Amino acid sequence: MSPCDQCHAGCCRSFAVPVTGADIFRIQANTHLGFWDFVCRWADPDGSIALQHAPQFRFSDEPDTPFVICLLTDDSQTVPGTGKCRFLAETKATPDKPFGTASCSIHTSRPGACRAFPAKMTPEGDLAILYDIPASGRPGSHPVYSLCPRPWTPADIDPITQVQDLVVATYEMKFFHHLAGIWNDQPGPWELFPDFLEIVYSNRVRPANEALSQIEAASGPEIEARVA
């Protein structure tokens, strides 16, 4: 039995979930929601959200604040006064499950960060290793933010599917770091960020003889016009 079975999903309540452009477009395609329905920017001045994993973006409307692009959060209906991921579906509390159970309502479209949890690739990219998960996602706070009920083991990780998901998630986040570098050279306002993503990702498939630097050159003038 997986640690996730019959869980109240403390991880989906505790953490800001970073997303890439690929995550955003996949969710849009499968839910028919718009960018503003589920994407937000989280101020991250101390890097506690990015954690040297997700890129930080700057925006002209708040130039001194670094942000991480994340999923929106909502108030919990099961546990008043606490929060949860926008897409976490909750069930009612019962005597034996005071926080109820919860599951991802977009599980097949969930972001790469969620697909990878609780594993990461080694720097060499040849092995997946498990995180040392703390007891709570928000130490000293509400018990609904408690995390996994038992330690994860390698047997809990599918060595094919989940490792493939982890490899893709690692690659996509690396690509998103590259996009952050392009955007941060000339930051535009937050309200134009979806346009920037649309331009870049629509140019992601190119003829074999064109390198990424040529993609930047081809899309650059239009991007600059939109974010100026």
Image (cartoon, rainbow, N blue to C red):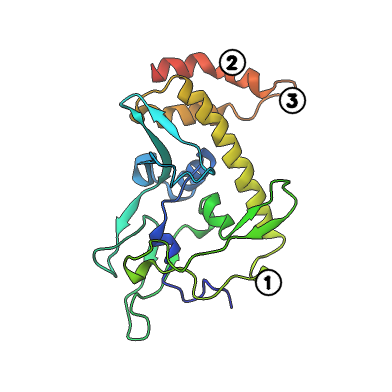
Farthest residue toward the left?
81
In the rendered image of this protein, does residue 195 appear above or below residue 85? above
Q: CA distance from mark 2 to mark 1?
A: 46 Å
Q: Which residue is mark 2?
A: 217
Residue 63: in sight, yes or no?
yes
Q: Which mark is residue 188?
A: none
Q: Quadrant of the C terminus?
A: top left
Neighbour tally class for label 3: few under 14, some 14-19, many 20 plus, Cα within 10 Å: few
Residue 216, quarter of picture: top right
Is 47 positioned to the left or the right of 129 in the image?
A: left
Q: CA distance from mark 2 to mark 3?
A: 16 Å
Q: Which residue is mark 1?
A: 155
Q: Which residue is mark 3?
A: 208
Is 191 positioned to the left or the right of 127 in the image?
A: left
| Residue situated in front as seen by the camera: 201 or 115 | 115
Q: Quadrant of the N terminus?
A: bottom right
- Are dots 3 and 1 in contact, CB under 8 Å? no
First of labels 3, 1 by sequence position: 1
